[in-house]
Amino acid sequence: HLYLDHNLLSGTIPPEYGTYLTSLRDLFLYENELTGTIPSSFGGMEDLRRLRLYNNSLVGTIPGEALGRLSNLVEVEIQGNKLIGEVPSELGDLVNLLTLRVHDNDLTGVVPAEICVLTERYVLEEFVSDCDGNPGELTCECCTECF
């Protein structure tokens, strides 16, 4: 477990985390001042179960290919950043995912059907996004809560 939340950390997330912390189960870097992107090397954290990166200043897109490989993930909380693009369909491969929070970013497009299948199977219990109907926000047929 690596709990570094609420520490006023700044700078980028070291990509080496994904290379050297392959047995990490929890990565909590929320409520800091982190910038840069979510490293694609996170795909190497095969045992990761909970990823909390919320309320930072992370930019770029959600690394779907990398995160989609993390079959043990039960929680992804990346809200409150400056992420752009679409919610990647690869997140639908996370068959153990219980919580997905992506609201308060600049994500657009339609939430992929692959993710909605997770909510239909009652696996994904909490899916929160910016989908309350404002122009430029996500279109979501399966979100449990919209902002």
Image: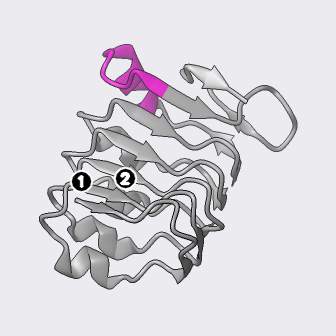
As displayed, is residue 28 above or below residue 10?
A: above
- Residue occupying the point 70% across, 36% down: 130
In the picture, the disc for residue 51 is 2
Q: Quadrant of the N terminus?
A: bottom left
Whole-percent x and y of residue 136?
A: 82, 44
Say which residue label 1 marks: 70
| Any part of residue 141 in sight | no
Q: Quadrant of the C terminus?
A: top right
User: Gap in Å between the C-alphas at discs 2 and 1?
Assistant: 11 Å
**Helix, strand, or loop for circle 2?**
strand
- Return the residue nearer the eye: 129 or 52: 52
Q: Which mark is residue 52?
A: none
Q: Amino acid at mark 2?
A: Leu
Q: Residues within 10 Å of mark 1 (few under 14, many from 20)?
A: many
Magenta stretch, residue numbers: 114-126
* Camera sees residue 77: yes
The relative height of residue 56 versus residue 91 in the rendered view (above or below) is: below
Residue 126 position, x and y percent, is: 46, 25
